[in-house]
């Protein structure tokens, strides 16, 4: 039987605690590389052993994750009554008690699945809030067949979506709470994840002329802006220089053509390199991935793939040539380098795309939905000096007369390339506290919390203590309370406010910037 790490056991226990106290659909948030498949296997085994009639469906979106989760269960429970339903894996074990399935293969088969007590979704951030999506339609069919009794548990490293914000907040959400959340920085500091280290790059991609649609850079305009030979050659020169002592390079590009051009530039330096995109033949893709993991291919360039479900622990250099406004995509790309491997001390990240400056450290990103007013408008235009025709700013030649606009200068930007990838690489600031006040904070659809406001000169800083929330939030609140009071942690925010007179006030708090917000990371007491 596989031995669980302490935090993996805690995640499973948190699920049982949640279901013992709540009726919703919880999320388990664990960073890439911390063993979600092991936690899923342990939870599934415990559930079926405790309730032998339980039928469980494990859903995800790629065959690699289906296979990985299935094998994790068999390692801990070889005789598990488990099967696979996946076209990519050529398996159709539709009636297994524990069924690992690909959503593309099974989304029209709810009528054949019939009875189901529990659905576990790996990479739960891929469930959109659109009624016609495969996940939502399939889950709705299952609920109808089972009289609304199906429980849904989501596992993800990024509990938010660019189009709708946090998965457990807002209208039409499937998930109701975070039952357990594992801080990425804790896992790095405890040695369960590999540090990611930013390295300065002189080359920076220029996206000033790229428009935005749906909160993300417009794909065609983005690739046109960054897929320039002189920029590619400059960036690849830096990748080769920094990668001299690195064994496995993973490069994220801004389009299929861009990925191939970067691959070709790397090959010209005598480095073995291949490209994987959505157009790659499945057999060839499997061959490339296996060779990369085995060290026979030193570099993989890719476009819009290898962000989830790809496990190559030896990856020790990541190059970001893919600017994104999606915090989830940013975290997933950097997360490909956090797995441990023999002889690997860290993974360096070359951010040519300015993503670290755009989003901040990967362990403190803000996944809340941005308001419309926060999104940039359409990209600017420029006028042809020969024929006065107005062109989109990303055009390299005039649409009317063919005039060639001068290529954009390679951007030299120290800020974007050297921003911290982990919050521990930031320099937090200690400030003296002159006074503390407490109040009830209410949010629609959520239990009230205790808002704590610190007065520090002319500035104030706040944190929220979630005494009434389930799972990880309650556990965190109880620890916060125990450090400040000899009275046991109260059950409700109202009780917390009534007992706030028992709380010791800190003499100083430690703050650090997180995007446009400020986070309180520590407190100092007399």
Image: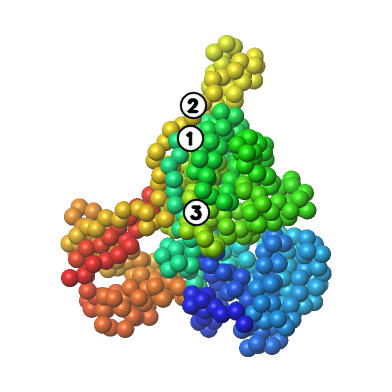
Residue 20 placed where, x, y %?
53, 83
Residue holding disc 2: 409
Mark toward the viewer: 1 or 2: 1
What residue do we see at 51% from left, 59% from top? 344
Residue 255 placed where, x, y %?
64, 40
What residue do we see at 49% from left, 43% from top? 242
Residue 307 shows in this picture: yes
Residue holding disc 3: 347
Q: Counting residues from the N terminus, which is met first, the one under dot 1 or under dot 2?
A: 1
Residue holding disc 1: 203
What residue do we see at 54% from left, 20% from top? 406
Q: Distance between the residues labelled 1 and 2?
A: 10 Å
Residue 29 placed where, x, y %?
52, 67
Task: Tell me, yes or no, whether the two marked residues, 1 and 2, touch with CB atoms within 8 Å.
Answer: no
Q: In the picture shown, does residue 146 fall above or below 34?
A: below
Q: Distance between the residues labelled 3 and 1?
A: 20 Å
Q: Residues within 10 Å of mark 2 (few under 14, many from 20)?
A: few
Q: Counting residues from the N terminus, which is met first, the one under dot 3 or under dot 1?
A: 1
Element at label 2:
loop
Residue most extreme to the top: 386
Which of the image's four quarters has the N terminus?
bottom right
Scheme of image coloration: rainbow
Q: How far apart are marks 3 and 2 (CA)?
A: 29 Å
Residue 169 placed where, x, y %?
51, 62
Q: Residues within 10 Å of mark 3 (few under 14, many from 20)?
A: many
- Does residue 456 appear to the left or right of 358 in the view shown? left
Q: In the picture shown, does residue 249 fall above or below 454?
A: above
Element at label 1:
strand
Q: In the picture shown, does residue 36 fall above or below 250?
A: below
């Amino acid at each position: 039987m596989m031995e669980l790490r302490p935090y993996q056991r805690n995640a499973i226990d948190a699920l049982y605690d949640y279901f013992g106290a709540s009726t919703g659909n919880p999320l388990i948030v664990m960073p890439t590389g911390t063993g979600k498949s092991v936690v899923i296997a342990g939870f599934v085994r415990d559930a079926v052993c405790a309730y032998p009639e339980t039928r469980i469906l494990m859903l995800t979106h790629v065959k690699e994750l289906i296979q990985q989760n299935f094998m994790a269960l068999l390692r801990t429970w070889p005789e598990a009554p488990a099967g696979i339903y996946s076209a990519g894996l050529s398996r159709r074990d539709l009636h297994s008690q524990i069924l690992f399935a690909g959503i593309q293969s099974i989304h029209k088969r709810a009528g054949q699945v019939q009875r189901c007590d529990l659905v576990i979704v790996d990479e739960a951030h891929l469930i959109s809030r659109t009624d016609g999506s495969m996940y939502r339609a399939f889950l709705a069919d299952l609920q109808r067949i089972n009289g609304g009794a199906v429980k849904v548990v989501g596992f993800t490293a990024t509990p938010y979506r660019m189009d709708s914000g946090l998965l457990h907040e807002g209208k039409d959400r499937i998930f109701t709470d975070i039952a357990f959340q594992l801080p990425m920085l804790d896992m790095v500091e405890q040695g369960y994840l590999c540090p990611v280290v930013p390295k300065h790059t002189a080359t920076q991609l220029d996206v000033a002329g790229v428009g935005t649609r749906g909160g993300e850079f417009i794909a065609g305009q983005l690739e046109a802006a960054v897929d320039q030979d002189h920029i590619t050659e400059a960036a690849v020169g830096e990748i080769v220089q920094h990668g001299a002592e690195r064994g496995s390079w993973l490069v994220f590009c801004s389009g299929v053509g861009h990925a191939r051009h970067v691959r070709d530039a790397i090959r010209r330096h005598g480095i073995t390199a291949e490209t994987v995109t959505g157009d790659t033949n499945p057999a060839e893709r499997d061959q490339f991935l296996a060779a990369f993991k085995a060290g026979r291919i030193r570099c993989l360039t890719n476009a819009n793939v290898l962000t989830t479900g790809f496990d190559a622990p030896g990856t020790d250099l990541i190059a970001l040539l893919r600017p994104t406004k999606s915090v989830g995509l940013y975290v997933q790309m950097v997360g490909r380098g956090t797995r441990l491997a023999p002889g690997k001390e860290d993974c360096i990240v070359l951010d040519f795309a300015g993503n670290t400056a755009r989003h901040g450290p990967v362990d403190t990103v803000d996944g809340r939905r941005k308001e419309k007013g926060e999104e940039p408008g359409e990209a600017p235009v420029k006028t042809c000096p020969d024929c006065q025709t107005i062109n989109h700013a990303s055009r390299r030649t005039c649409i009317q007369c063919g005039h060639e606009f001068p290529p954009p200068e390679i951007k030299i930007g120290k800020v974007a390339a050297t921003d911290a990838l982990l919050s521990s690489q930031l320099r937090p600031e200690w400030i003296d506290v002159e006074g503390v006040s407490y109040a009830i904070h209410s949010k629609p659809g959520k239990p009230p919390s205790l808002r704590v406001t610190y007065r520090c000169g002319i500035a104030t800083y706040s944190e929220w203590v979630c005494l009434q929330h389930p799972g990880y939030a309650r556990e965190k609140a109880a620890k916060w309370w125990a450090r400040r009071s000899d009275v046991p942690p109260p059950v409700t925010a109202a009780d917390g406010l009534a007992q706030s007179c028992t709380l010791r006030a800190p003499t100083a708090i430690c703050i650090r910037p997180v995007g446009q917000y400020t986070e309180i990371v520590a407190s100092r007491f007399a």
